[in-house]
Image: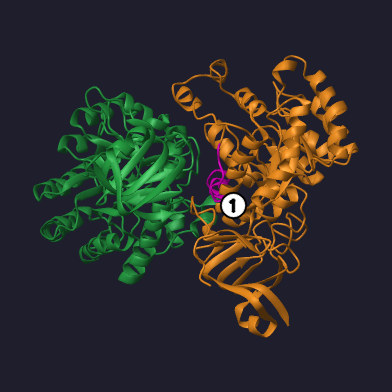
Chain colours: A orange, B green
Amino acid sequence: MIRADLLVTDVAEVATLAAGAVPRRGTAMGELGLVRDAAIAVAGGRIAWIGPARRRSREVRLRSGGRAVSAGGGAVVPGFVDAHTHVLFAGDRAFELPLKVAGASYAEIARRGGGLYATVRATRAASDRTLLAETAARIRRMARHGTTTVEVKSGYALDVPGELRLLRLIPRLAGEVGLAVVPTFLGAHAVPPEHAGRPDAYIDRLVRLALPTIARERLARFCDVFCEPGFFSPAQSERLLRAALELGLGAKVHAEEFVRSGGARLAARLGATSADHLLASTAGDRRALAVAGVTAVLLPLTAYTSSPAGRIPGREMVDAGVAVALGTDCSPNSWVESMPLVLAHAVHRGRMTPSEALTAATVNAAHAIGLPGVGTLQAGGSADFSVFPFASVEQLGYRFDALPEAVYRQGNPVFSRRLRE
Amino acid sequence: MIRADLLVTDVAEVATLAAGAVPRRGTAMGELGLVRDAAIAVAGGRIAWIGPARRRSREVRLRSGGRAVSAGGGAVVPGFVDAHTHVLFAGDRAFELPLKVAGASYAEIARRGGGLYATVRATRAASDRTLLAETAARIRRMARHGTTTVEVKSGYALDVPGELRLLRLIPRLAGEVGLAVVPTFLGAHAVPPEHAGRPDAYIDRLVRLALPTIARERLARFCDVFCEPGFFSPAQSERLLRAALELGLGAKVHAEEFVRSGGARLAARLGATSADHLLASTAGDRRALAVAGVTAVLLPLTAYTSSPAGRIPGREMVDAGVAVALGTDCSPNSWVESMPLVLAHAVHRGRMTPSEALTAATVNAAHAIGLPGVGTLQAGGSADFSVFPFASVEQLGYRFDALPEAVYRQGNPVFSRRLRE
């Protein structure tokens, strides 16, 4: 008999994603491992048991002092994993919107104090306390939308001490918000103003001065690079990522966002963990990613804000056998905190089924940030899950703004509205 | 000295929209009537005073037993007015999405049990209790996103007794959710299956059998019609709307959504209160709407789900001097409850400034549903407002998924997260 600290009853449907990250041989991205009329038992912050409600009383007992809550006939899904964010920054860029609406070009917006370098200036100038407070508030709101694991990139300092400062803030952030946070070093987010026209010199500094410290102090799990004309070339990106891989970091590439520049092929060649954006990728790129087992992280809201049609190659990636993951890409350029909104865009502008989008937002997203087992609900795994106020998980990806009633991380509520005890 | 029941302090910025619905001579749609470092006093469910915090203690006193709450340095805006919804229905159509993703045509989806008539079948079959429960849950979630006034259309019964049943449910709905609800008769949402090929006969029935009862029992404020090829012609629409106008109802038209069919000109000719959708409208249509003083109700999420680019003619309407309002168009075809999401789409796909979008979602939306004074915050007006966790209202339209911390209707919290007392 299993003893539970927490028992969630009256679950109309739970998506366990128990098959693990897909695609793998014999598994489709739409297989959710559904259990209907279910109950979920948690012990010590981990899933202790999950199965049909009718078997629960024979197999699980609530320990004295434990809590039972009703999901009220709702659906339970693993906590969302947001596989790509630039959430660590100061300030905002709302002031750009009237300029954009009036037809100002990116160059003109930059001249008037906007663009990525505006956020670099604000982030460099911000105190640790401000950065932590603003970023923690964003991540807490992400949790209100059902997210329990967040990848967080550095990248708005663009100098070695500043980037190290950002990475050192991330564990404090994680402690403050109570979610799982995975740090990624994106010193190569753009060429800093101080190195304008000399990207190689900046890559040199990152390789010589930043990466060794990051590896030694384990400040990041991944090294990422913006591989795009005007940012870093495939050769520059490769030099940085090879150095990172040698030091034991995983590799990620911002690839083919605006034009096809070779980032996806580079990711495949290096065995990167993920290639991200991919709006301008080709069928050949998709084959290369599939063969190399690189996860495609698609970012539908960024496509929405930056491209006229807002299409993402979701269907194409799935059909090519590429593992697809999703992220908000939350940044001052596209301020999005809600993974349910990301799922809806993936369905409507990526032609993914709701089930595929849910896989992409949970188990596959965890796979894309090096967390096997996360994004699933199985005995032994972390009890990270959300309760939604509808009976079927297929409502995610259909409703644009589904809000969970409660969100649990390691068996504790990080957000809860009114589950009955 | 004013005596307040409720005092909201520490308001970084409040948008009063005190100039009223725009455009009017000398007023631009982006003028928000901002008060910075403000306080708001409520008495008897109405705004009693609103002004700079430094003047508050001289002019307002909290009556004994009254409450003071801090907005925590957040921004306050009028409760959103959702000017166009089909929120009164049963069931959902999530099952259509995998078919759509696979490329099924509208006709094929209908053959497989989907489309508008699927919702008609579900709504006809649903009990009053089910319809009330499902719809009230949707409207309550709308309030969590900051909406305090909702237009609700009938239209999923498509027979006279069924449509009257839906209209009679609306006041009960309003009582249940505690928001302001404005009922619109949309018996002419589509040609019912029983009248296939005979739309004139159905319009006859609506004119003879439905409208007199609706007018006598005051079941609806407006009569609306879907004027589009395959639905109702301009001549059929005109016949219905003239009969409604003669009985004292206001007129609305679903116009130029898919193709240009003359609905906007009809709205202008009849002096309708609003023309809605308007994706295929022309410059001439816009001039006609401006001259006739018809409000254009734009529905960005429906444009997003139904058209490749998802563009709405926001900028074009504002520049032509048309009053623009916004709505979710929440329906089983495009399930959207969040007005902040609608604002963001209006900015990104309608080239409206955030200030114009806020005007369109408050005072202009109220104007579009016959509620002058609503959607503003002024002494004497209903105390319907939301507190957002950021210092400037310009964040609305910029952040995709802004969630309010608290929402008040007639001075009472309909949703509140954690305002400090």
Rendering coords of residue B393 (x, y %): 42, 35
Looking at the image, residue A335 lies above or below residue B185: above
Q: Which residues are magenta?
A: A335-352
Residue A349's quadrant in the figure?
Answer: top right
Left or right of residue B419: residue A234: right
Local SS, label 1: helix
x%, y% of residue B279? 36, 36
Residue B341 in sight from this viewpoint: no
Image: A129 above or below A113: below
Q: Is residue B220 left or right of residue A401?
A: left
Q: Position of residue A325 (x, y in %)?
A: 68, 48
Give me the residue at 78% from left, 44% from top: A273
Name the amino acid type tagged 1: Ala
The chain letter under disc 1 is: A
Q: Nearer the viewer, residue A276 or B393?
A: B393
Q: Is residue A190 above or below residue B158?
A: above
Residue lying at 74% horizontally and 64% vertically, measured from the top left: A381
Q: In this view of the protein, can residue A342 be seen by the observer?
A: yes
Graded by Cα atoms within 10 Å as few (under 14), some (14 to 19) or many (20 or more), the crowding at tag 1 reads: many
Q: Residue furthest right?
A: A246
Q: Quadrant of the N terminus of chain A?
A: bottom right
Q: Which residue carries the number 1 mark?
A: A143
Indicate yes or no whether the magenta region holds residue A343.
yes
The chief SS type of the magenta part is helix
Looking at this view, is B356 or A292 the one in front? B356
> How far across and how far down the image is residue A238, in percent?
83, 30
Residue visible at 29% across and 41% down in the picture: B60
